[in-house]
Image (tube, rainbow, N blue to C red):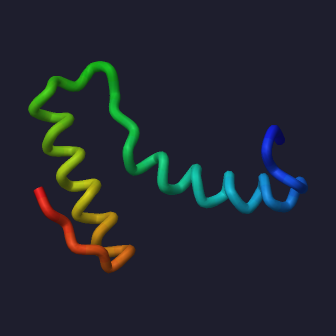
Amino acid sequence: MKRFKSVGHVQRFLSVHDQVANLFRNFASSNAAERREARSKTFTAWAEVTGVAVSF
């Protein structure tokens, strides 16, 4: 709980962090081209969810 003031703050942060972090995970067995494609798809999905424009 290092910098969190309460257990509730930790739980709230981790519940969101887990969902977002799963979008950006890379697998060691993938090559660079697969990672670039996955990252592109991830940022596109993130932009749709947040309403933020994507610039590559």
Seen in the picture, residue 35 relative to 54 is either above or below; the reply is above
Residue 7 against residue 36 in the figure, above or below: below
Looking at the image, the residue that sits furthest to the right is 6
- Which is nearer the eye, 5 or 45? 5
Q: Residue at x 39, y 50 (%)?
A: 23
Q: As displayed, is residue 39 above or below residue 6? A: above
Residue 48: percent from the left, percent from the top?
29, 74
**Front in this rendered view, residue 37 or 4:** 4
Measured along the vertical axis of the image, is residue 18 above or below residue 47? above
Picture residue at 14% right of the left edge, 27% below the top:
32
Name the side, left or right, on which 38 lies relative to 16: left
Residue at the limit of the structure toward the bottom, as seen here: 51
Identity of the residue drawn at 9% across and 32% down: 33
Find residue 7 and report its image quarter.
bottom right
Q: How many marks?
A: 0
Q: Which image quadrant: the N terminus?
A: top right
- Residue 52, x across and y down, in percent: 29, 74
Residue 44 at x, y percent in the picture: 22, 63
What is the quadrant of residue 13 in the picture?
A: bottom right
Residue drawn at (53%, 55%) of the image: 19
Q: Is residue 4 left or right of residue 22?
A: right
Residue 30 image offset from top left, x and y in percent: 22, 25
* Apparent side of residue 20 relative to residue 24 in the rendered image (left or right): right
Which quadrant is home to the C terminus? bottom left
